[in-house]
Image: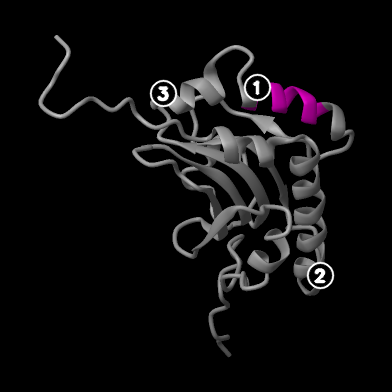
Amino acid sequence: MSRAPQAKSSKRPSKAPDISWIQTLAAPYLRGYRAAAKSRGPLRGYRFLARRKPGAKTSAGFFVGYLLQPENHEFLHPEPPECAVFAFIEPVNSASYRRLVTTEGSLLRRTAEYIGWLTHRRPRFAFFENRTAVLVRHFSMRAWPPEKHRHFSRNFFIETLAWLVRSGLVAKLASQASVPRATRPSGKHKS
C-alpha cells in the first residue's frame, strides 16, 4: 500500500503573517513618521519614514515587522521567521548616511553605544555600518508556539520601540535625517 507523499517540512512560514495591527501598535512610539506597508520580499511589516526636507535625497526611519526569509539579510545570521525592528538610512553612500552613521560620534554610533547599556538581555541591538539597516534588533520565533506568535511579537515590538524612544533616536532621527542639498542660483555654476 503506497502512501501519499507528505509535504516537505519547511522553515518558511506557511503563510505571511497578519501585519495589519503593527501600524496601530507602533504609531504612538513613532509619532511624526509616515507609515508604509512592506508586504513583498523577505520583510513583512511597516516602514516608518521621517519627513524629508525639500530637496533631500535621503530616506530614514524605522522598520517594524517580520523577517520571513534570510535573503538580503544574511549579515544578521537570521533564523526566520523573526521579529525585527531596525533604524534605516538610505542610500548608504549619501552625505546624510556618512553624517548620521559612519562619522565618529555620529547619531547612530552614539545611540548604538547608549542603547547597549539599556538592553541587558538578549536579543541586543546590533550596529551595522555600510548597510541600509543600521541599528537592528531581531529575534527568531521558531521556538514560539504558532498561536503565541502575535502576542509575543507585540511584546517584542513594544519593548524594542520603547528603548528606541528612551534612547532619543526616534526624535533625533526625525529632526536630523535629511539635510537639503545646497541650492545654487539658476544659471550660475561654480567652477
Q: Classify residue 97 as left or right of residue 157.
A: left
Calculate the distance from the C-alpha at mark 1 to the C-alpha at mark 2: 34 Å
Who comes first in sequence, dot 1 or dot 3? 3
Distance of mark 1 from mark 3, alpha carbons?
16 Å
Between 67 and 91, the residue placed more toward the observer is: 91
> Residue placed at 53% from the left, 19% from the top?
102
Query: In the rendered structure, which disc, 2 or 3, sits on the residue that comes first in sequence?
Result: 3
Quarter assignment of residue 88: top right
Residue 181 position within the rendered picture, expressed as x and y whole percent measured from the top left = 34, 29
Which residue in the rendered view is the most extreme toward the left?
A: 187
Q: Which residues are magenta?
A: 108-116
What residue would you read off at disc 2? 148
Q: Earlier in the sequence, mark 1 or mark 2?
A: 1
What label sits on residue 109 in the rendered view? 1
Q: Looking at the image, which residue sits at the far bottom? A: 1
> Residue 173: x percent and y percent?
60, 36
Question: Which residue is identified by label 3?
Answer: 95
Give residue 168's position: percent from left, percent from top: 74, 35
Which residue shows up at 65% across the image and 22% down it?
109
Q: Callout 3: helix, strand or loop?
A: helix
Give the residue type that dot 1 points to.
Arg
Compute the Cα span from label 2 to label 3.
43 Å
Q: Nearer the viewer, residue 172 or 146?
A: 172
Neighbor class of circle 3 (other Cα within 10 Å; few <14, some 14-19, many 20+) is some
Amino acid carrying mark 3 in the image: Ala
Work out which quarter of the rendered image holds the C terminus and state it. Answer: top left
Residue drawn where x is 38% and y is 42% of the image: 54
* Residue that appears at 69% across and 59% down: 26
